Image: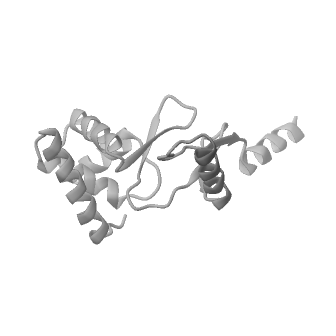
Amino acid sequence: MMLDKEKFEEVKKIFTAYLENKGLRKTSERYAILEEIYSRTGHFDVEELYAGMKEQGLQVSRATVYNTLDLLVEHGLVSKHQFGRNLAQYEKSYGYRQHDHVICTECHKVVEFCDPRIHGIQTMVGDLLNFHILHHSLNLYGVCGDCRAKAAARAASE
């Protein structure tokens, strides 16, 4: 895990202003959660985040992790995804490029991709329908090559 200190300070300022605006307390636990999230790469769930903080000896309750994640999602500093399972996945989002996901329905592997044509479609649809598009979410579901190979191997041995 690697923290981009400059980006983190920027995110911390934005989060501080948001908390002040909402009249919420600026606690060390909330900032520790923010720092842990912005130190991570890829997707994570609440339990992974909570366990990672406990491993580092940080005293934070599960409820505080959930509540802080909700605040960060609400303010756009973290993205929340439902990749076809009952388990929400999160990822840091401030200052990171828009991307989309391909999800394996067998092993639940998530692969990120970026195609500039999607941005073009988003812009065109916004113009056509007179919408100011704020963001989008595109998830493609299928079976990955590893899972297809395992299924083929099982079928060949039967």
- Outermost residue toward the top in this view: 86
Relative vertical location of residue 18 with respect to residue 113 in this rendering, above or below:
above
Q: Residue at x 16, y 44 (%)?
A: 21
- Total count of labels: 0
Query: Is residue 139 among the parts visible in the rendering?
Result: yes
| Viewport quadrant of the C terminus | top right
The image's colour scheme reads one colour
Judged left or right of residue 47, residue 107 is right
| Residue 56 vs residue 77, the one in the foreground | 77
Q: Quadrant of residue 25?
A: top left
Please give the name of the residue rendered at 26% of the width and 52% of the height, measured from the top-left corner.
34
Q: Depth check: 82 or 62 in front?
A: 82
**Residue 59 makes an appearance in the image:** no
Give percent across and percent down for residue 113: 62, 57
Spot occupied by residue 154 in the image (x, y as percentages of width and height)? 81, 39
* Percent position of residue 15, x then y: 23, 51
Q: Along the horizontal axis of the image, is 96 left or right of 31?
A: right
The residue under the point 58% across, 46% down is 126
Image quarter where the N terminus lies is bottom left
In the foreground, 77 or 46: 77
Which residue is depicted at the point 58% across and 32% down?
84
Name the foreground residue: 154 vs 43: 43
Q: Position of residue 51 (x, y in %)?
A: 31, 44
Quick check: 60 above or below 63? below
Position of 146 compared to 131: left or right? right
